[in-house]
Image (tube, helix red, strand yellow):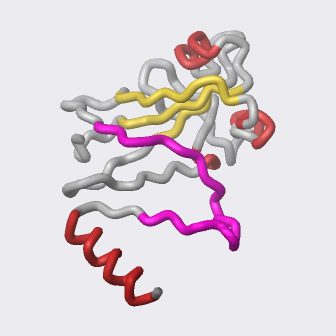
Amino acid sequence: TTPQYTGFRVSLAAGAVAPPYSCAGGGSIPLSRGCYKAKFSVPAGDGWHAVSVPFASFSDLWSPATGEHTKECSEDASACLTAKKLSSLQRVELWAEGAVGKVHLELKSVSAVPAAPHPNSTPLLTVSSPAALAAAAATAAAAA
C-alpha cells in the first residue's frame, strides 16, 4: 500500500436512483444524489492496519473532477448519510482521485461497525505486525 498517497476515498451508494450515475456525478448534476464519499488515509508500516472512516465524514455533495466535498454534512443536512439511507446500501467503492502519485492499496476486508460498541460485544483486536500479535496474545493470556 502507498501510505503517502493523499487521494484515497471510499464511497457508499445508498438511496441513489442509479448508483453508477450518482457515483459519477457527486450531486452536481440532476439525479446524482445518493453517493456518499469520504477521504481516508492509510498508515505506514508493516502488516494490516484498521482504517476507520466515520459516517459523519461522508457527503453526497462532491466534485466529480476531484472527489473533494463541495458541502460538508455539517453545512447542509441534505448531504448527510443517514441511518435510513445506510439501510438501503447499494454499493461500496474505493477511489484514488484528486491527487498525483503512485497508488497501491491492498484490502483485506470492509465492515461497518457502530461508533460505540455495545457493552456485551466482543472487542475488535487489530494488530499490525507479528510482534504486536505476540504482545496481544501475551496480554490476553495474562488477563485470562
User: Which corner quadrant of the image does residue 133 belong to?
Assistant: bottom left
> In the image, is residue 100 part of the stretch drawn in magenta?
no
Query: Viewed as shown, does residue 103 lie left or right of 27?
Result: left
Q: Nearer the viewer, residue 28 or 54?
A: 54
Query: Viewed as shown, does residue 105 lie left or right of 29?
Result: left
Q: Vertical placement of 88 versus 142: above or below?
A: above
- Residue 104 horizontal/vertical position (percent): 24, 33
Q: Vertical placement of 126 versus 67: above or below?
A: below
- At horizontal 75% and vertical 41% (from top left) the residue drawn is 82
User: Which corner quadrant of the image does residue 58 belong to?
Assistant: top right
- Tell me the quarter of the image containing the N terminus: top left
> In the image, is residue 119 part of the stretch drawn in magenta?
yes
- At horizontal 74% and vertical 24% (from top left) the residue drawn is 15
Q: Vertical placement of 33 versus 132: above or below?
A: above
Q: Vertical placement of 3 versus 143: above or below?
A: above
- At horizontal 48% and vertical 32% (from top left) the residue drawn is 68
Majority SS type along the magenta span: loop
Query: Viewed as shown, does residue 76 lie left or right of 93?
Result: right
- Residue 55 horizontal/vertical position (percent): 62, 47
Identify the magenta region.
Answer: 106-125
- Residue 126 horizontal/vertical position (percent): 40, 62
- Residue 48 horizontal/vertical position (percent): 30, 52
- At horizontal 63% and vertical 30% (from top left) the residue drawn is 60
Residue farthest toward the right in the current orientation of the protein: 84
Q: Nearer the viewer, residue 60 or 139?
A: 139
How many labels were placed on the picture?
0
